[in-house]
Amino acid sequence: MKTLRQAKIGETVKVVKLTGEGAVKRRIMDMGITKGVEVYVRKVAPLGDPVEVTVRGYELSIRKADAEMVLVE
């Protein structure tokens, strides 16, 4: 298994598990990234932060630290 941070540009991945605790995990879930949802990696900023993804039909920028808490397959 890998993290959302390790997913390549143009790849569609499925969320398997969210790591992290409390408010951080809740914020990721509030953005629409929950178990079982498909995430398309659109772009990655030049220094790797943030990562732009499409989830549930909308575009979202997620910090590198938060993307590392999302396990995908």
Image (cartoon, helix red, strand yellow):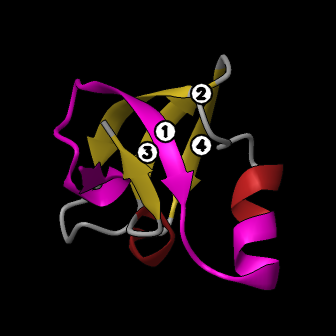
Cβ atoms at labels 3 and 2 below 8 Å apart = no
In the rendered view, would you say 15 is above or below 58? below
Instruction: Tell me: 50 left or right of 7.
Output: right
| Extent of the magenta region | 1-26
Q: Which residue is mark 2?
A: 37
The circle on residue 52 is 3
Residue drawn at point x = 47 percent, y = 42 percent: 16
- Which mark is first along the chain, 1 or 2? 1
Q: Which residue is mark 1?
A: 15
The residues tagged by marks 3 and 2 sit, at their Cα atoms, a distance apart of 16 Å
* Pair 2/4: label in front: 2
Instruction: Tell me: 72 left or right of 70.
Output: left
The residues tagged by marks 1 and 4 sit, at their Cα atoms, a distance apart of 15 Å
Return the x and y of residue 27 as percentages of the image width and height. 78, 66
The residues tagged by marks 2 and 1 sit, at their Cα atoms, a distance apart of 6 Å
* Pair 3/1: label in front: 1
In the rendered view, would you say 2 is above or below 12? below
The residues tagged by marks 2 and 4 sit, at their Cα atoms, a distance apart of 14 Å
Amino acid type, callout 3: Glu
Cβ atoms at labels 2 and 4 below 8 Å apart = no
Instruction: Tell me: 12 left or right of 55.
Output: left
Return the x and y of residue 38 as percentages of the image width and height. 50, 24
Amino acid type, callout 2: Val
Q: Is residue 23 magenta?
A: yes
The circle on residue 60 is 4
Cβ atoms at labels 2 and 1 below 8 Å apart = yes
Amino acid type, callout 1: Val
